[in-house]
Image: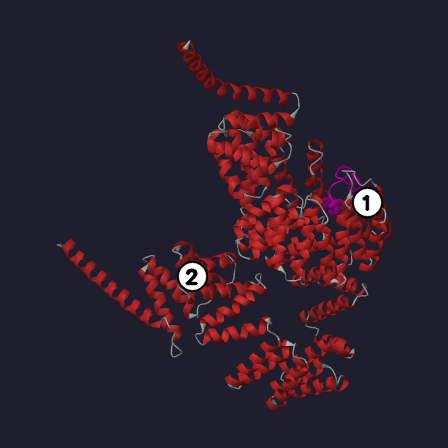
Amino acid sequence: MKTTFLALATAGLLSFCDTAEERAEARYQSGLELLEDGDVDRALIEFRNVFRLDGTHREARRHYAEAVHARGNLREAYGQYRRLVEQYPDSLAGQRGLAELALEFDDWDAARRHGEAAAELDPDDPLVQAVNATVSYRDALSEDDEDETARREAVTKAQALVEDNPDLMVARRVVIDDLIRNEDWSAALSAIDAALARDPEDRQLYTIRLGVLNQLGEQREIRAQLEDMIERFPDDPNVPNILVRWYLSQGEAETAEAFLKERADDAAAQPADDGDADIDAITTYIRFLTDVRDLETALDELGRLLEADPPEAMRLRALRAGLRFDLGDRETAVTEMEDLIDGMERSGERRDVMTMLARMLDTMGNNVGARALVEQVLEEDGQEPDALKLRAGWLIDDDRIDEAIVTLRSALGEAPEDAEAMTLMARAQERAGNRDLMADMLSRAVEASGNAPEETLRYARHLISQDNLRSAESALITALRLTPGHVGLLEALGEVYVTQADWPRVTQVIETLRGQGDDRAERIANELNARQLAAQDREDELMSFLDTLAGEGDRGLGAAATIVRSRLAQGDEEGARDYARETLEANPDSIDARFLMASVEAVTGEVEAARTALRELTEEAPDDQRLWLALYNIHAAQDDEDAAREVLRDGIEAMPDNLRLNWVLAGLLERDGDIEGAIEIYERLYNADSDNLVIANNLASLLATGREETQDLDRAHQIARRLRGRDVPAFQDTYGWIAFRRGELDTARTALESAAEGLPDEPSVQYHLARTYDELDRDADALERYRRVVEITGDGTPPDFLPEVEDAIARLEAGAEDDGEDADENGEDTGN
C-alpha cells in the first residue's frame, strides 16, 4: 500500500511537470484557433495564459504582438515586439515590427537600428526594405546640404516596392512626400488617391490630401472631402474644426455656426447613458462661439445646452467654469471645479475635469497643485493624453528632455493626430538639439491641425529662420486659404515677401491688412509699407508717409521717432530737436513724446536736461523699461558707474522680473567677477523663460566656466543641448567648452573651431580651442591658438587664464625645440 502511494505520487509529480509544457502549448493552439475564427479578444486572453505558464513562448509572443498591432494598439504592440526581440534577437517579425512602429513614433534611431537588424535576417523582405528606404530618404533630407543622389535612390526604391507590393503604405508615403516636395500637385493627388484605395481609413492621408487640394484650388472637392471625413471619422474633433475654418474662408460664418449648433443640439439631446454621445460636438460649438462671437454668448449657449441634461454633463459644467475663469472670475471657477470633482466617482469624465482644473491652477501659478492633480490622473490612467501633455510640458521646463520625449510618445500613441502633443514634441526635440526632428514635428502638427493658424505660424517661423522662404510662403498661403484675414499669418507672409524683395506681393499683403479694420493690422501694414519704401530707397516718399502717420497723435509717435532717428543719422541734430519738440507740443501729456524729446537731448549733448526728464518719467511710469535703460545708459556713457548701478537697482525694484534690466545687471556682475551673483540672476531669468536661447546660453556658459562641481556641469550640458549645430559663434563656444569639460574632445573641436572662426578676436574662445587642440596632442595648432590669445589681449585687461596660456606657450615651444634637436640627431645618424 505504501509502495503504491509513493509510486502514484511520483507519477503525479512527473505528470505535473509534463503538463505545464503541454498546457502552455494547448493554450497557444487554442489562441491560434480563436484568431483564425476572428475572436481576437479571447485569443489574446489565451496567449496571456501561455505567458503565465511559459514566459518565453516565441510564437505566442509573436502572434500576440501582431494581433494588438493589427488592432491599432501601437504602444502595447511595441512593448510586445521588444520583449520578443529581447528574448529572440533573431526574430524577423520582432525586428520588423519594431522598425515599422518606430517610424510611427518618429523614433528614427530605433527605426534605423531595427531596420538594419531585420535586413540582416531577411534583406528581401518588402516591409524591411520600405522601412530602410524611408530612413535613407529622411537622412538624405536631413543633411546640411541635401543629398540629392541619396534622396533619389530612396524614392526610386520606394516606387519599385509600391509597384510590386501595392499594399505597402510605408513605401507609398515616401513617394507621396517626394511628389509634394517637388510641388507636383496633380501627381501627388493621384498617388494619395491610389493609397486611399488601399487603406481608406488612413486619417493622415486625408489631411495631406486636403493640403494638395488647397494647392490645386479645388474648393468644391475640399468641401466634399471634409463632409465625407465628418462621417468617416466621427470621433475626431479636428475634422469639424477644419470644416468650420473652410466655411469661414468662404465667407459662410452663418453656415459654420448653424452646422456646429445642430451637432451640439443633437449631442445634448442624446440619452445621458448613451456611451456614444458626441460631447466633443458641444465643446467645439462653444469654442467656436468664444472665438467668433464672445465669451458671454458662449456662456449663455452652454447654459441653454445644459438645461437638456446632456451626457457627460459634469464635463460641460467644468467647461462652463472654464469660461468663467477666462472671464476673470478665477476663484469662483476653481471652487466650482473642486466641488464637481468631489461629487464624481472615479471615471474618465472625472479625470478630464481634474486635468482641466490642473490647467487652471497652472495658469494661476499654483504649479504644485496642478502637478499633484496630473499625477493623480495618471495613477488612475497612465495613458490619459491631456494629462501626459501637461506632464511633458513641465518636464521640458525642467530640462528633463528624455523623459519628456518618452511621455509624449505615449501621448501620441494614444492620440496620433494630436497637434498639441506634436508641438510639445517639437519643443522637446529642439531642447535636445534635434532640430531636424523638431522641424518634422512642426510640419506634422500643421497637417494634423488642418493648417490651423498657430501651428502654421510656428512652422513658418522655423522655415524663415532657416531661410527656407519658399516653403514658408507655401505654408502661410495654404493656412490663409482656410483662415483669410488672419493678421498673424499676413504679418509673417509680409515678412517673407520683404525678405524676398517681392514688392508687388508686399503691396497685396499691405492692402489686405488695411482691409481688416483692426488697429493691429493697420500698424503692421504701416510697418511693412515703411520697410518697403526704405528698401526701395524712396526716401522722400518714406519721410512723407511717416510725417503723415506722425500727425495721428499717440498712434503716430512711432513714426515720429523714426523720422527723428533718420535726421540724427543724417547729422541733422537741429532738425531732429525741432521735430521732437513739435511732437511734444502736439502731445504734451504723452510719455512717448516726452521720452522722444529726452532721447534727442541725450544724443545731442543736453545730458543734464535728458537725465532730469528721464528721472521724472521713471517716477510717473516706473513699469516702462525704456526709461530705466535710457537713464542707465546716460550714466554709463559718462562713466558714472555708481549712479548707473543705482538706476538699475531702482528699476529692478520697480520691475523685479524685467528681463532687460536683470540682464544688464548680470552682465555687470559677470564683468566684476561676481559669477555667483550673475548665475543667481540668470537662474531667475531662466525659470521665467526657459525657451530664451540667449538666457539658456549665458546660464550654461556660467555654470560650465564658473563652477567645478559635476552636477553643475551636467546641468550646463542639459541646458546647452539645444545649442548644438546652431550657427551662432557664442552658442558654439558654450556647447564646445561644455563638451571639452565632459571629455568629448571631437565634439568640442568641431564646435569650437566654428566658434573661433566666427569670433576671431575673442580671447576666451581662442583659449577654449587652444585647450582642446592641446588635449588632442595637436601641438602646432594649440601653440598657434595660444599665441593668438596673447596677441588679441594686447595691452588690454588680461584675462584670468593668461598665465596659463603663457605657461602653455613656453611648454609647447620647448617641446618644439626638443623635437627639432631630435630630428637633427636622427638626421646625422641616418647620414652616417
- Choose between 69 and 212: the one closer to the eye: 69
Q: Residue furthest front?
A: 1
Q: Is residue 659 left or right of residue 589?
A: left
Q: Is residue 258 left or right of residue 655?
A: right
**Is 158 situated above or below 788?**
above
**Is 795 situated above or below 205?**
below
Helix, strand, or loop for circle 1?
loop
- Choose between 739 and 334: the one closer to the eye: 334
Image spot of residue 233 (x, y percent): 74, 39
- Choose between 13 and 157: the one closer to the eye: 13
Q: Mark 2 sits on what residue?
A: 737
Q: Residue, x 75% and y 76% (percent of image)?
A: 556
**Is 777 situated above or below 191?**
below
Q: Residue, x 58% and y 61% (percent of image)?
A: 691
Q: Is residue 162 left or right of residue 337?
A: left
- SS assignment for the magenta stretch, majority: helix
Compute the Cα span from label 2 to label 1: 61 Å
Q: Residue, x 41% and y 68% (percent of image)?
A: 764
- Taking the magenta stretch, the answer to whether it contains residue 230 is yes
State which tag comes first along the sequence, 2 or 1. Answer: 1
Q: Mark 1 sits on what residue?
A: 310
